Image (tube, coloured by chain):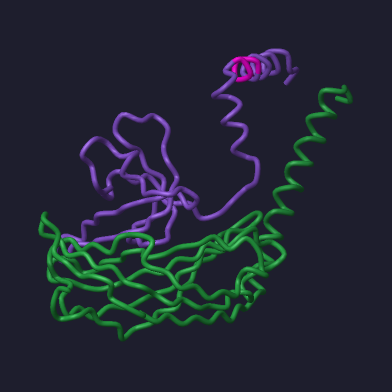
Chain colours: A green, B purple
């Protein structure tokens, strides 16, 4: 009962159990963080708005995205993935979510930002429903921990509308 | 995998026809049907330049619910190395099973 093998096994099992416990506690500590993120998005310009040859609408926009996500970072945060999605409804689809821009925030210092950009990913509808379409721009963020549970939340900004006619 | 609907931003695990290793990437586009609730999904690796259409089967533009096996909810550092080592150096897998088998045979109880 006291052989090296038994002792090594007991020690390793104990070590791994303690490690798992520490991971769980680290992850739990993230629950005590009450973040207060802010963001604002302006659509500066509709660059062009067309119906593609396959019949689907596509629009290109220039956006001003500013946000302060510094309160999301804890000691257990590895990075924050942030993205801006256009969300709207059409007769065929109860929900459409199209990511227009995303970024990886590696540290708290980088979490307050202001960017001026055209949409990184193409804003294409399934169909031709975008003329005069009201849509929300939602800033989503996913907090990737060093260990443990990932947290995700969002800020919905509504009141955006696409032009009535192609241009 | 929970019955919750698939939404943009979630990290999903999916299989592509013809590829044996599942891919764990983030959903960047969602189109959900009014009538059936079925969904077309596009994924992309966070640090990749382009979306996953190059990884999907030839001619496939979207993933559907049945392609998706699960979603990621958390992160355990270095645990994946066990699977990687066992896949790349299968001899370690055999040694491990052999050693466990030996332990079972030689233990007194």
Q: Position of residue A48 (x, y in %)?
A: 23, 70
**Residue B7 belongs to magenta span:** no
Q: Nearer the viewer, residue B19 or A119?
A: A119
Q: Position of residue B91 (x, y in %)?
A: 61, 15
Q: Position of residue A16 (x, y in %)?
A: 74, 41
Q: How many marks?
A: 0
Image point 79% across, 41% down: which residue? A15
Image point 11% across, 54% down: which residue? A54
Q: Which stretch appears magenta? A: B91-95
Which quarter shows the C terminus of chain A? Answer: bottom left
Which quarter shows the N terminus of chain A? Answer: top right
Q: Could you tell whether A167 is left or right of A60 in the image?
A: left
Q: Could you tell whether A50 is left or right of A99 in the image?
A: left
In terms of image quadrants, where is residue A72? bottom right
Most frequent secondary structure within the magenta stretch: helix
In terms of image quadrants, where is residue A42? bottom left
Q: Nearer the viewer, residue A118 or A152?
A: A118
> Taking B19 as reference, is A113 above or below it?
below
In the picture as drawn, the residue positioned furthest to the bottom comes out as A159
Q: Could you tell whether B83 is left or right of A43 in the image?
A: right
């Amino acid at each position: 009962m006291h052989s090296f093998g038994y002792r090594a096994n007991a020690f390793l099992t104990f070590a791994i159990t303690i490690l798992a416990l520490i991971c769980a506690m680290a992850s739990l500590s993230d629950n005590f963080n009450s973040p207060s993120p802010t963001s604002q998005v302006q659509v500066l310009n509709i660059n062009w708005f067309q119906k593609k040859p396959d019949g689907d609408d596509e629009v290109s926009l220039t956006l001003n995205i500013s946000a302060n996500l510094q309160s999301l970072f804890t000691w257990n945060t590895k990075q924050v993935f942030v993205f801006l999605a256009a969300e709207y409804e059409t007769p065929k689809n109860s929900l459409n979510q199209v990511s227009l821009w995303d970024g990886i925030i590696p540290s708290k210092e980088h979490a307050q930002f202001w960017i001026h950009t055209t949409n990184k990913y193409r804003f294409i509808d399934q169909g031709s429903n975008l003329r005069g379409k009201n849509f929300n721009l939602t800033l989503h963020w996913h907090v990737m921990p060093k260990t443990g549970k990932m947290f995700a939340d969002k800020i919905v900004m509504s009141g955006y509308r696409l032009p009535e006619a192609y241009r | 995998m929970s019955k919750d609907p698939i939404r943009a931003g979630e990290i999903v695990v999916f299989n592509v026809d013809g590829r044996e290793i599942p891919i764990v990437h983030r959903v960047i586009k969602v189109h959900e049907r009014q009538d059936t609730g079925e969904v077309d999904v596009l994924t992309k690796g966070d640090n990749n330049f382009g979306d996953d259409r190059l990884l999907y089967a030839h001619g496939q533009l979207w993933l559907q619910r049945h392609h998706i096996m699960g979603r990621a909810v958390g992160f355990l550092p270095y645990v994946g190395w066990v699977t990687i080592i066992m896949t790349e150096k299968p001899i370690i897998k055999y040694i491990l099973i052999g050693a466990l088998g030996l332990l079972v045979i030689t233990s007194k109880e």
